[in-house]
Image: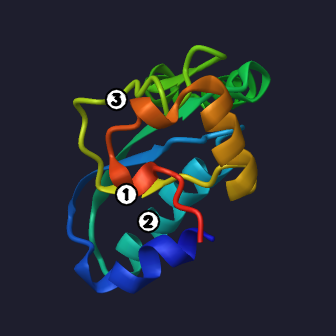
Amino acid sequence: MANLIFLPIADLVESATYLLYDGAVGTGGMLTVGEETLKEIAKATAKQVGTHLYGQEINAETYAICKADLLLKGDGDAADNIVGGPAHSTLSADAFRSREFDFIDVRTPHMAKSLEERSRTHGWQKEIKDPALRYHPR
């Protein structure tokens, strides 16, 4: 899955520091795989890259797993950039509103219809500022 994000632009990766964000981070698997994939691409093209990981998760249990995993890997700085719990819905409480990211991966665990239903139930639709994130029925 991370290849879908990075391979199309592999030839554009330069020596730099990149910010990676997952707005439905869950346990953090895709975020850390994305970081590894970016570093592998950079290494193959003799580039030096640094990364900063950011994530947001509404589910308190998976958020705690993500944070603990990063801490156990010795990546405390990244763990500081992971926020979560019931008050941290990406749709209604963007924790990184002022931040711009180089790569974003947001795969919600719910089907679009379920997301639309939940957003109506919780009133999220009116709070979503970015029209690309609003539910658009076909």
Q: Residue at x 43, y 45 (%)?
A: 21
Where, by quadrant of the figure, is residue 42 drawn?
bottom left
- Dot 2 falls on a residue whose secondary structure is helix
Crowding around mark 1 (Cα neighbors within 10 Å: few <14, some 14 to 19, many 20+) is some
Which mark is on residue 96? Answer: 3
CB-based contact (under 8 Å), mark 1 and mark 2: yes
User: Residue 92 location, x and y as percent?
Assistant: 48, 27
Marks 3 and 2, how far apart in space?
Answer: 22 Å
Residue at 75% x, 29% y is: 62
Question: Nearest the camera: 46 or 8?
Answer: 8
Nearer to us of marks 3 and 1 is: 3
Q: Where 100 sits versus 122, above or below?
A: below
Report how far apart the C-alphas of labels 1 and 2 lie in the structure: 10 Å
For the point 61% across and 36% down, the residue is: 119
Q: Quadrant of residue 65?
A: top right
Is 85 on the left or on the right of 128, as rendered? Answer: right
Q: What residue did someone put label 1 on?
A: 103
61 vs 11: above or below: above
The kind of residue tagged 3 is: Phe
Render colour scheme = rainbow
Question: Is 86 placed above or below 110 here?
Answer: above
Q: Residue furthest right?
A: 61
Residue 123: % across, % down = 55, 26
Label pair 3/2, CB-CB below 8 angstroms: no
* Location of the C terminus (image quadrant): bottom right
Q: For the residue labelled by badge 1, is the local secondary structure a helix, a strand or a loop? A: strand
- Residue position marked by numbered label 2 in the rendering: 38
